[in-house]
Image (cartoon, rainbow, N blue to C red):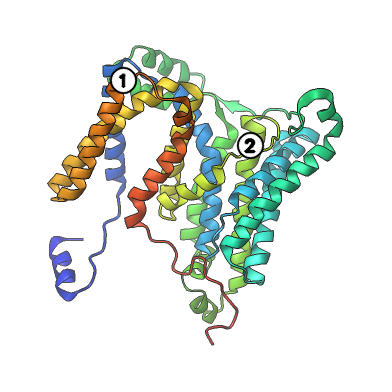
Amino acid sequence: MSTATAARAKASGAPAKKRKMSWPVVLLLIAGALVLFSAVGMITDNHSLTSSGQVTAALSAAVPIGMAGLGGLWSERAGVVNIGLEGMMVAGTFCGAWGGYLVSPWFGLVAGMLGGALGGLLHAVITVTFGVDHIVSGVGVNLLIPGICAYVNRIYYKDYISAGAGANQSPPADPLPYITIPGLSPGLKDIEAHHWFLVSDVAGVVGGLVTNISVVVLLAGALIVASYFALWRTVFGLRLRSCGENPTAAESLGVNVYKYKYLAVIMSGAFAGLAGSYLSLVAAHFYKDGQTNGRGFIGLAAMIFGNWMPGGLAMGAGLFGFTDSLQLRDPESVHVLILVVAIAMVLLAAWNLYRRKYTAALITLVVSGGLFVWYFTTEEVPRPLIVATPYVITLVVLALASQRLRPPKADGQIYRKGEGK
C-alpha cells in the first residue's frame, strides 16, 4: 500500500491494510539469519546450529508438528476448532505401529491416517451434528483416545509385554526408506567441515536437506503444497473456507455446510494420524504411551503462528522442529542459541527505533541485555530448561505474533442448518 493510500485510509477513518510479507523479504530474512548463525559460530567456535546433522534432525522433528498443524488448518478453515489433534495423533501412533508390525510400514502409514481420521469423525459428529462446544469435544477426544490405545496395547500385545518389553510398548515395525543424494551429499559435507564463513553454513543447511531424509518428510512437504492448491486454488477449497468465514452465507449459495465441515475435520484427523504414525514408524519404530509428548498442541501453535496459512505453518513447524531437535543432539547448542537470540533482539530493537516505536525498542533491549548476561555468566543451560525449550519458544512466538493474527471469522461457532432463514 502506498503512503498516499494509507493517508487517505487514515483520513477517511478506515483502517490501513497491513502489508503481507513477500517472498523477497522472507528470503532476505533467511539470508540474514544464516549470516547471524555463521558469525556466532565463528565467535563461539560452535557450528552445530547450521550443521547438516542439525538440519536433518530439525526436519525430522518438524514433520509431526507440521502435519498436526496442517490438520488444524483444514479443520479451522472450515470453522471447527480442533484441539483434539493430540488424541488423534495418539490414534495414529497406535494404528501406525499396529499396521507396520502386522503388514508393512507403508500399510502402517495408511493405518495411522485411518486411525486419526476416525478420531476426526468422532470430533465432527460431536461438534457438527450435536453442536457440542468444540473445546469440550477436543478435550474429550484427548482423554478418550489415549486411554483406549493404552488399554488395547496391553491386551493385544500381552505375550510380547510379558516377555519383558515393557508394559506400554508394542513390537517393533520395519523401517521406512531414507533418501540421500549420492553425488551432492559428500561434497557438501566436505565444504561444511572447513568451517568457512557463511559458505560452510550454507553447505551444512543444503547438505541436511539432501542427506538421510525419510520419505515421509518428502510426503509431508508435498501435502503442505497440495493443501495450499486444494484450499486456495479450487472451487472445493473456496467452498470449504466459506464455511469457516460465514456458513450462513455459504448455505444461501447452495453449499452443503455440514458436508464440508465433516470432510475438513476428517481430513484434519487423517493428517494428525500421519503425524502420529511418523512417530511410531520413523522416529521410534514402535508404539509407546506418551509418545506424542504434546506435539499436537505445538502443531496448533505452529498453525496459529502461520496465521492459518500453509506457508506460515511450514515456517512455524520448522522453527519449533529446530528448537525441539537441539535438545536431542547437542545440549551446548542451546547455550549458543541464547547468544544468537540476544543479538537478534538487538537488531530488532534497532528496527523498532527506526520505526519510532520507542517502548518496544526499550523492552527488546532490556530482554537482550538479560540474555547477554545469562550467556556470559553461564557455561551451560540446565537440562530441565533444555527440555522445555520448544514449549518456551512456542509461548514466546505466539505472544509476539498475536497482534497480526486473523483467524476465520466463524471459527469455533456452533452452526445449525437454516439458521439464517
Expressed as whole percent of the image width and height from the top left, the position of residue 86 reads 60, 48
Looking at the image, which is closer to me, 160 or 322? 160
Tell me if I can see residue 114 in this picture. no
Reading the image, the residue beneath label 2 is 291
Q: Which mark is residue 41?
A: 1
Q: How many marks?
A: 2
The residue lying at 61 percent from left, 40 percent from top is 292
Looking at the rendering, which quadrant does residue 27 occupy?
A: top left
- Number of other residues with Cα within 10 Å of mark 1, as a class: few under 14, some 14 to 19, many 20 or more: many
Q: CA distance from mark 1 to mark 2?
A: 33 Å
SS type, badge 2:
loop
Instruction: Give percent across and percent down for residue 219.
Output: 57, 40
Residue 230: % across, % down: 52, 57
Contact, CB < 8 Å: mark 1 with mark 2?
no
Amino acid bearing label 2: Gln
Left or right, residue 80 beside residue 103: left
Residue that sits furthest to the right in the current view: 159
